Amino acid sequence: MNQPTHNTQSNPVQLYSGPIIAATLSPLLGFYTLMISHHVSRVTKDLDKLVHAFGYWIPGSTGTGPDGSIGSYSGKETLALGVWFLTWLIFHFLWQKQDLPVKRWIPVFLGAIGFVTLCLFHPFIDPILLLLLSSGR
C-alpha cells in the first residue's frame, strides 16, 4: 500500500519591519509633542491657555479640589497622546508590508530619545529658548 507523500515544508511567514518602526516612531513623535507643547506653554499666558484648551475634558484640569488643578499639563498630555495614536495608526497602515532598515533606525531612535530627554531638562534648554525668543523680536 503506497502512502501519499506530503510536503512537510511549510511556506515561511514574511515578517516586515515597518510595523516595528511605526510602533517606535509614534511614541517618539508623542514625546516631541509633549516637549514642544511644554515649552510653548511657558512662553506666554495666552499660549498656556491655548495648550490647556486641549485638555479641559480631563477631570482635574480645572478646579480647586484637594489636589488642586493640573492646569495645562492636561492639554500637553492630550496633544502628546493624540499625536502618538494618530501617527501610529497612519504609519502602521502605510508600512505594514514594508521592510524598513531597522539597523539604521536604532541609532536614530536612541539619539532622538536622548535629545528629547535633554530638551526637557531646563538648565539645557532654557538658554536656547531665551536666545530663540529674543532673536524673534
Image (cartoon, rainbow, N blue to C red):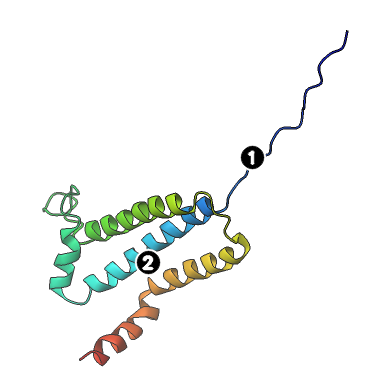
Q: Does 44 sit left or right of 110 as displayed?
A: left
User: Which quarter of the rendered picture does the C terminus lie within?
Assistant: bottom left
Residue that appears at 40% across and 80% down: 124
Is residue 85 found left or right of 92 in the rendered image? left
Q: Are marks 1 and 2 in contact (CB under 8 Å)?
A: no
Dot 2 crowding, Cα within 10 Å, few <14, some 14–19, many 20+ = many
* Nearer to us: label 1 or label 2: 1
Amino acid type, mark 2: Tyr
With respect to residue 93, does 33 lie above or below? below
Query: Where residue 132 sits: x, y (%)?
Result: 30, 86
Where residue 18 sits in the image (x, y, percent)? 53, 54
Name the residue beneath numbered marker 1: 13
* Residue ID at (28%, 73%): 39
Q: Residues within 10 Å of mark 1 (few under 14, many from 20)?
A: few
Q: How many marks?
A: 2
Q: Nearer the viewer, residue 81 or 119?
A: 81
Q: Earlier in the sequence, mark 1 or mark 2?
A: 1
Q: Quick one: SS at disc 1? A: loop
- Residue with the mark numbered 2: 32
